[in-house]
Image (tube, rainbow, N blue to C red):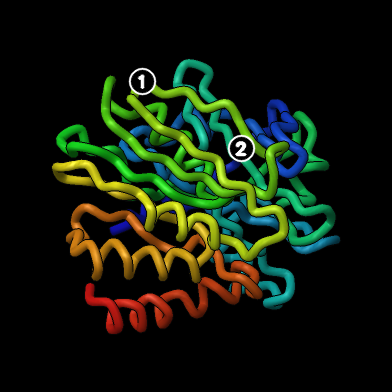
Amino acid sequence: MAERRGRKARTGVVSRVEQLTPHMVRVVLGGEDIAELTVGEYTDHYIKILFPPLGVSYPEPFDVGVIRETMPAEAWPVIRTYTIRRWVAETPEIWVDFVVHGDAGIAGPWATQAKPGDLVRFMGPGGGYAPDADADWHLLAGDESALPAIASALENMPSGARAKVFIEVEDADEVQKLETPADADVKWLYREGQPVGEHLVTAVRAVEFPAGRVQAFVHGEANFVKELRRYLRVEREIPMSQLSISGYWRRGMDEDGWQSSKREWNQQVEAEQGA
C-alpha cells in the first residue's frame, strides 16, 4: 500500500534542466526543504507538485489549507504526481523526469520552460515499492510514465539479481541509458503510433517465467495495467504481496479526472480479478 507522508507543502528550487530525449525533460530540484526530505526507502517515491493556474499568485507563507479556505476553486493549485527519479543525498537534490507532448497539459510545458532559480511547491514524498532482495527474479514493465521508477529500481537492485524488464516508448529516440548492478534483460518496445501498452501486454505474456518467486512492478496507462494484472494475478496466480501494479494515468483523462475515478476503477478491477 502506498504510504502517505509529509502533507505539508514544501518548496524546491530548480538548479538545472536537462533534455533527456525529445519527449523527456529532467528538472533537478534543490534547496533547504529538499535537504529535509526522507527519501530512499522506496524506488517509486513520488511527490505531488502544485502548479498555480495562469496569472494566480498566493500569499506567503504558502499554505494549501488557507488557499482552499480563502480563494475560489478555480484559483487552487493544480496537482500533478511525479516520481523522484533519483535522490542525491550529498548535494542534496532530487531529479524529476517529465514526459512532454508539446504544449499539451500543465506539467510538461512547465518543465520545458523551467529555469534555475524557479520555485516549485510540492507535497510528499510517498511511495510503496522497492526491489525485494529475497525474490528469485524481478519483472518490471511500464510505459514512459513508469520509466523513472523502473530506472530507479534497476539502480537499486541487489548485485546479480535477475530481472526481466519491458519499457514501451514511442520510438527509438526515446531510449535512455539505464544502469544496474542486476543481471537485467532490458527490452525497449516501440509504440510507433499503436495504442499505449499493446506491445507491453504481448511481450509480458510471451515471457518464459523462470523458476522461483517473482516480484513484479507493472505501472503506466490503466487499461494495459488492468490486462497485465489479470494475467499475473488470475492466470499466473501470483499473490498480491508479490505485485506492485497500478495505473498511473488513463487514456482520455487528465490527472484530476483519473484521481477522482481511480478508487472506483480499482474496486471494480479487484471485484473482477480478486484482491
Q: Residue furthest top?
A: 90
Quadrant of residue 94 in the image? top right
Give neighbour class at mark 1: few <14, some 14-19, many 20+ (Cα, 10 Å): some
Q: CA distance from mark 1 to mark 2?
A: 30 Å
Quadrant containing the N terminus is bottom left
232 versus 114 height, above or below: below
Residue tagged by mark 2?
A: 12
Asked whether 4 or 243 is in front, the reply is 243
Among numbered discs 1 and 2, the one appearing first in the sequence = 2
For the residue labelled by badge 2, is the local secondary structure a helix, a strand or a loop? strand
The answer, for residue 41, to whether it is visible in the render is yes
Q: Position of residue 128 (x, y in %)?
A: 32, 50
21 left or right of 248? right
The answer, for residue 58, to whether it is visible in the render is no
174 versus 242 height, above or below: above
224 left or right of 215? right
- The residue drawn where x is 53% and y is 18% is 91
- The residue drawn where x is 41% and y is 44% is 44
68 versus 122 height, above or below: below
Residue tagged by mark 1?
A: 181
Amino acid at the residue labelled 1: Pro
Q: Position of residue 269 (x, y in %)?
A: 35, 78
Asked whether 55 or 182 is in front, the reply is 182
110 versus 72 height, above or below: above
Amino acid at the residue labelled 2: Gly
Q: Position of residue 234 (x, y in %)?
A: 24, 70
149 left or right of 255? left
Quadrant containing the C terminus is bottom left
For the residue labelled by badge 1, is the local secondary structure a helix, a strand or a loop? loop
- The residue drawn where x is 59% and y is 39% is 96
Q: Which mark is residue 235?
A: none
- The residue drawn where x is 57% and y is 46% is 189
